[in-house]
Image: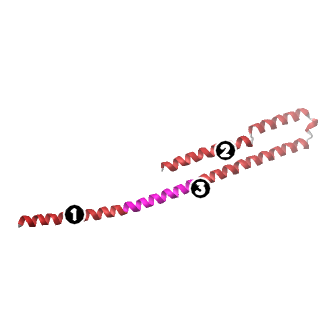
Amino acid sequence: MVKMENILYQFKNLSLKLDESLKVMERNFELLSRLMERVEQSVRELNATFENLARTIREQENLFADQVETLLNSFNFEVRGFRDAVKLETFNETKELLDSLLEAVQSEINPQRIKPMMNELVQASLKILSRAGGAR
């Protein structure tokens, strides 16, 4: 009889410990579930931030390219106006020098060359952002 009571006592004690362990596991599961929800929300927010950043970079690239093109057109217009104002046709040497200068500037700063370069810069930035987003 004493053995049976001892076994019954040990069983109840073990049962209480199992119940307590189960409660701890349930609490841990709830905490882990909440943590996972927060992580998922953070990932969604990061993805949205990276998408907005990528969109902003693309928009800024287009604006920059347009501004460069506008500046080049304005520069070309000013050079043409300058040529007309000082009547460069009477100063052949100066005209040739300005023509070569204008050609040199136009060959170095060409919107058709800048736009692809800016596009490459944006693509490289997007790759870096996507890698940074993937690493997180």
- The front one of 87 and 29 is 29
Residue 90 occupies quadrant = top right
Question: What's the CA distance linking mark 3 and mark 1?
Answer: 52 Å
- Judging by the rendered image, the residue that carries numbered circle 1 is 17
Considering only order in the chain, which callout, 2 or 3, is on the residue closer to the N terminus?
A: 3
Disc 3 residue type (three-letter): Asn
Q: Residue at x 90, y 43 (%)?
A: 84
Query: What is the residue that sits farthest to the top in this orientation?
Result: 93
Task: State the residue in front, 25 or 1.
Answer: 1
Q: Which residue is mark 3?
A: 52
Secondary structure under tag 2 reads helix
Residue 35 image position (x, y, % from top left): 41, 60
Residue topped by disc 2 = 118
Name the one closer to the observer, 52 or 93.
52
Which stretch is magenta? Answer: 31-53
Q: Which mark is residue 33?
A: none
Helix, strand or loop at disc 3?
helix
Q: Are marks 3 and 1 in contact (CB under 8 Å)?
A: no
Question: Residue 42: x, y in percent?
Answer: 48, 58
Relative depth, front residue between 91 and 104: 104
- Kindly state the secondary structure of the residue where label 1 is placed: helix
Q: Residue at x 66, y 45 (%)?
A: 119
Amino acid at dot 2 = Met
Question: Who comes first in sequence, dot 3 or dot 1?
Answer: 1
Answer above or below: position of 49 versus 104. Answer: below
